Image (cartoon, grey):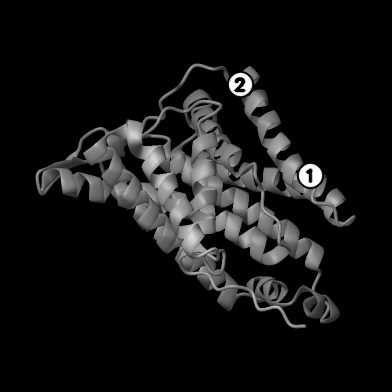
Amino acid sequence: MTLLMAALITGIGLGSMYGLIALGFQITYSVSSKVNFAQGSMVMLGAVLGFVFCQQYGMPVILGYPLAILCCGVMGVLVEFFLVRPFAVRNSEAWLMATVAGGILLDNAVLFTFGNEPRTLPSVLVEDSWNILGSGVYPQQILIPIAAIGVALGLHALFRHTRQGRALLAVVQNQTAAKLMGINTTVMVTGSFAISSMLAGCAGLLIAPLFSVHSDMGTLFGLKAFAVAILGGMTSAYSVMLAGFIYGMVEAAVTTYLGSSYTFIVVFALVIAVLTIKPSGLFGRAAIKKV
């Protein structure tokens, strides 16, 4: 029972974090049919900037963390402007490799400036654990799903109750029609990349106190989050978040009962099996082509 509870709590925390990153993939794909394969690097950037601002420069968390997230948003704008748009306007798929290369460049830039020594981002939420049904749980592990759900609800409110959000939804539904209605679709696409990178940076800050902060920490998180986005079907934010919870709990259960050596083998084998049966994802719907 204790092992099951520990796996459940760990899985919910990991799953919500994967879902938050995957939500960034879903947003950019819905708006522009493009994704930022440097998303994992944005996770790392958020954690590193949070450490630099709060530990090296002595900023309070309430100031340093939002500034780190804002910087990630600016980086997302730069990715769209320099690595995606030049190829998209020529109907080239080279943006895919360009974003991968951009992530590698960012990782190495941080490696040379920040160093390769893993750092710890202190937090009062990981100093003492709580006993929940015999399992030790850090408050930070409880905060992650709460924060992820809060961010998802905030995005929902933004899209439904603000002019800019409704404009973004219009671009998602029909970019050509939105452009004819006077909506600047280029700005909307750029904004989607900014939001995507800010979500990744937020995830990086949430997990930083539980993991070491270093230049390549985001690689695996980005890969898993992309698997979650595909698994959810890329159809809606809800499906991606739900897929994140499922993925996280399966991963935690496999690690708890079989060991970390089997985690990648079992989890990705299950992902392949699911996509073989449902190529559109667990909650996705196959696109209807009119001829």
* Residue that carries the numbered disc 1 in the rendered image: 83
Question: Looking at the rendering, which quadrant does residue 61 occupy?
Answer: top left
Looking at the rendered structure, the secondary structure element under dot 1 is helix
Question: Looking at the rendering, which quadrant does residue 286 occupy?
Answer: bottom right
Q: Is 40 on the left-hand or right-hand side of 203? A: right
- Identified at 46% across, 37% down, the residue is 60
* Residue 281 at x, y percent in the picture: 50, 64
Give the quadrant of the C terminus.
bottom right
Question: Considering depth in this image, is 120 or 249 the residue closer to the camera?
Answer: 249
Rate crowding at label 1 as few (under 14), some (14 to 19) or many (20 or more) other CA atoms within 10 Å: many
- Identified at 47% across, 63% down, the residue is 277
Q: Is 253 on the left-hand or right-hand side of 35? A: left
Question: Looking at the rendering, which quadrant does residue 208 occupy?
Answer: top left
Q: Is 214 on the left-hand or right-hand side of 174? A: left
What mark, if any, has residue 111 been given in the picture? 2
At label 1, which amino acid type do we have?
A: Leu
Q: Is residue 147 visible?
A: no
Question: Considering depth in this image, is 92 or 177 the residue closer to the camera?
Answer: 92
Q: Is 259 on the left-hand or right-hand side of 283? A: left
What mark, if any, has residue 228 been given in the picture? none
* Residue 282 at x, y percent in the picture: 46, 65
